[in-house]
Amino acid sequence: MAESDIVVKTQSLTKVYRDFWGRKKKTALNALDLTIHKGEIFGLLGPNGSGKTTTIKLLLGLLFPTGGDAFVFGEPAAKVEKNERIGYLPEESYLYRFLNAEETLDFYGRLFNIDPDTRRKRAAELIEMVGLSADKKRILKEYSKGMRQRIGLAQALINDPELVILDEPTSGLDPLGTRWMKDLILELRKQGKTVLMCSHRLDDVQDVCDRIAILYNGDLQTLGKVSTLLEDAVRLEVRANKVKESPELKADLEALFKKHGGELETVGHPTTTLEELFLKIVEESKARPGRRYLPPTETAAKQ
Amino acid sequence: MMSSALFGILQLDKGEPLGFAHISGLAQSWLQDAGGFAMIGLVVYLLYAMMTPTDKSQSEKIRVPVSFFMVGCAALAVLCYASVGGLYALQAAGKTAFMGMPLAPPPLPPPPPGMPIVLPPPAFQTELIPIMLMIAGTLALLGIGEPFARDMAKIRRRNLTIGTSGIRRFVQSVRSYAGDLLNARRLMGLGVFLGIYAVFGLLIFAFGSDRLFGIYLGVCIVGLTVFLLATLTLMLFEAEGPVWAIAKLSFKEAIRSQLLWVFLLIFLPFLFPAQWFREIKPSDELRVTVERMDLALTLLVLIPALLLASFYGIPNDIKNLNIYTVVSKPVEKFEIVLGRFVGYLSLMTLVLIGLTGVSLVLIMNTSISQRAKDETYKARVPVRGKLEFKSVQAKYRADKTEFEGTNVGREFDYRKYIPGGEGAMQRAIWKFPSIPANMGTAQDDRVPVEFTFDIFKLTKGEQNKGAFVSFRFVTHNAKQEQPTGAGTWPWADKQREKEYQDRKREISKRVNIEGAKPGTPAWAEVNKLAEEFGCFEYGSKEVFDYQVMGLEVPAGLFRNALQGNPGTEKDPRTEKDVPAPRVSVYVKCETPGQLLGMAEPDLYLLEYEQPFTINYVKGMVGLWCWLCILIGLAVACSTYLSGVLSLLVVVVIFNAGFFTDFINDLAANRTVGGGPFESMSRLMKAEQPTAPSSESAGGKALSAADKGWSWVVRRVSKVVPDLQSFDWSAFVAEGFNVDSQYIVVNLLMMSGYLLPWGILAYYLMKSREVAA
């Protein structure tokens, strides 16, 4: 990849938290080397306290590195001007609760020096996009957690950023909201934006990220493409349609795999994810109000 | 600096307030003091930069910049401070000059016995040590201020576009904002409110109370003015740039937090005139009302400002983590500080304007007695002179010393006294080295002179009877001579004195000189006499204790005074040549058994009078300066401290500002009973504070520790603002004009005080990890 395609780069980035007397309290991040390219969705994974949010804060200049350096768009992280191309959604939506949605977006738009007409137009679009048109005059104090997360995302996009940094973007969202957020992240990639997100909800990361880095205790454990990291190269999965499970089928398959030097592990019906099931139920309930959802097994039995 | 006495006379016990003449001295002392702190800051910053890996990390290099200019300034400043150290060493060795240049200004002469220590007004000092300190301070300020100035220039570019594009953008913003602001719902709400208010007004009008209707109309005008100003302020905040956005945010936050409204509701009743609640002596009605309102306004404005700026704002942003979403935008951290300062200051300024307006409406619509109006419902523009006490020449006095006024043993020895009696030779003499040219052409050919004296009675006297006082006004053309014995004060030119007496006698045959009133033929004769001889006498004026009284002096006297050059004379206190007076006023107490007490501001020529209302508003500028200092301090402290801590720090520093006299005494190690170490020893030994200090080794050690302590206090005292120099309430309450130059100097002093705090806030905010 060309150097110009690099959006985020860290070199031995280290952060040590110290107490008032300068004594070392914790190494939050230890010599992190990372490169994020233009147009990709990059996920930072790890348990609580692994250094994900610290990395983001260092990139944004909210924290100062103890060692190493971080660059965004080729500029040192301490340079304020680089923030013009960044949109940031914090873990919780830390917005001013006495402002309403319109005022919030107007305020953040003004921090970017966006001219009033563009600001107003963009705010209206974003409010529409995050589904808060009906509540745009209510102050944020009255919003639910999910609504605050939505308006938080809108403020992160007010400057039409090239790099969107999302810290736990699905935190506080219901499954519908989570799906909406994930679709939006994918949409941002389609628009050519780079997304850096961190989460400990593994399914979210798996669903949208191109590459991930797993941190543990401040150390980078692994880094790579999601598909490559998740691939189990020594096992093979075969799926078939319109075939009924029977002892004969199982015996035939055992013989077939034996012939190719392997062995059959299991034969059974695949399961869907709980998220997909939930979404399906909601979709069907919307389409046919008043009718109870029937699982596929019952539907098959009735037929 | 100035206060209102118990009996309602303006006291200037530390001399006149600072004016334009003191600016150079103030600037020099500011460069020395602020420069000293800047040097400490510069050293700390450079040490911090050395410990930061700026060579390995580009981010750190941006965050902790060190330029060649900065290092150069630091090196030169250190060199200058080292040479100051050398000069001090020379001084300690007994030298007074270096290479022909004096090292330091001569020490102040001790005050006359019983007189308080009055520090001289700031003046530019040309001696070697003060000049070197000033240069060193300037270099340190330049060094520490370089990154600040560079970032301020960047912030200026981002927040103030001067030019057509900036104006176009601003107009576009205002248009867009006004569209939102004046929507149908809001206009309807405003209409309903005004309708209700109008109905209320009609009811008051029908009730027939003119005064109540006056208050109603006044409050309406004040309300509309504040509303318009608030709208204009909010429109101003529509200018491009984060500072304005954050200022507007602070404004809205404060309004919506309800803190302000709660305060206004609780304390608003305190704004009502004092006589609505209790009976006050007629002549004191206005001054008590004004002082009370001033206190109410001070509390109403300063307390919410303190709470807003210390608790809300930056500490709240950090506590609630709102700052993450602001700092992650292209915003310099100091823009947040500026935005908060501008936002809170604008809001509280509007509150101050509103409350000033309401209080003025209440004062103007309150029934005030004629005596109060005569004394204080005005803004006198006085011409003040220098006061001296004289009697017969020292060599003819029993104690062979010059008479310097009698101390009657009052606890507060602000005034000095002259004994009364027909043959008394003691005089209080006011000397006016310069007088305004328009006094010669004063209206009705008269110049008013006002005075207020204290009468100290040695005998019981009669009830409701004052002391009789005679006045002699002379110009430099009718010089008086200090007498050698009993009799009267003679003229220097005896022949001229005889001519004057002869002419006076001749005129007296035709008209009554003593009873001459302006506008009468007798007054024209008196004027002619005064203009020809430069002398006017007024005998036996009955004077009452602490009552503002006046005399009319013929303008002819001033026409005479304005002719010729009075030359110079020796100042008895400093032994320096000073301009000789054009006009002198000799005051003599005629009543035996009475002593007449006077201080310099007690007698003045009245140049003209201004309206009370304008003076009241001018007086509020001082309170506005307090407001700026308080908000500036609170915002600066909140860049590093939590809400509670910054509140405490500001309260301590601000309150200390009311005790600068005591702090100065501590700094100069001149408190009675010694400094803290000696006082502690006296406490433990149960010694009187006035007992002489012990000469033992222990006593000397305590004395040395106190000297060290006073050195520390001298340095730290510069952090404390001299709040008393911004307080004009006594001027307004006593009916004296607050001169525009005092206000300009106040604004300069306030800016000078806040600038170092601004630089400190810049570095604190820049070095703070907001997410740590």
Image: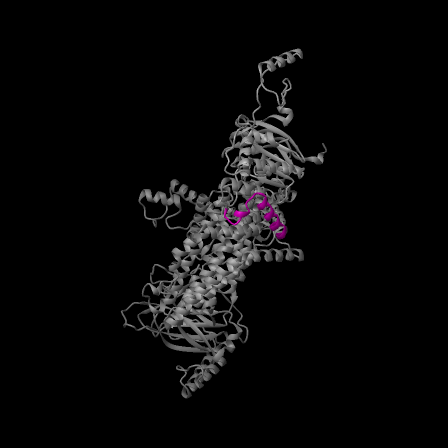
B683 vs B558, left or right, is left
Query: Which one is nearer the viewer's eye here, B410 or B573?
Result: B410
Which secondary structure is most common in the magenta stretch? helix
Q: Residue A290 appears at what percent x and percent y?
A: 50, 38
Q: Residue B471 appears at what percent x and percent y?
A: 41, 74
**Above or below A123: residue A221:** above
| Quadrant (top left, top right, bottom left, bottom right) of the N terminus of chain B | bottom left
**Above or below A302: residue B212:** below
Which residue is drawn at the image coordinates 51% and 58% (left, top)? B186
State the scheme by which the image is colored.
one colour
Residue A138: in magenta span = yes
**Above or below A22: residue B37:** below
Query: Outermost residue toward the right?
Result: A2
Query: Which one is nearer the viewer's eye here, B724 or A195?
Result: A195
Q: In this view of the protein, can residue B168 be seen by the observer?
A: yes
Query: Outermost residue toward the bottom?
Result: B510
Q: Residue A264 appears at what percent x and percent y?
A: 61, 14
Highlighted magenta segment, given as a residue range: A115-139
Q: Residue A207 appears at what percent x and percent y?
A: 60, 31
Query: Which one is nearer the viewer's eye here, B583 or B765?
Result: B765
Corner quadrant of residue B271 = bottom left
A1 vs B500, left or right, is right
Residue B761: in magenta span = no
**Above or below B237: residue B684:** above
Query: Which one is nearer the viewer's eye here, B286 or A163?
Result: A163
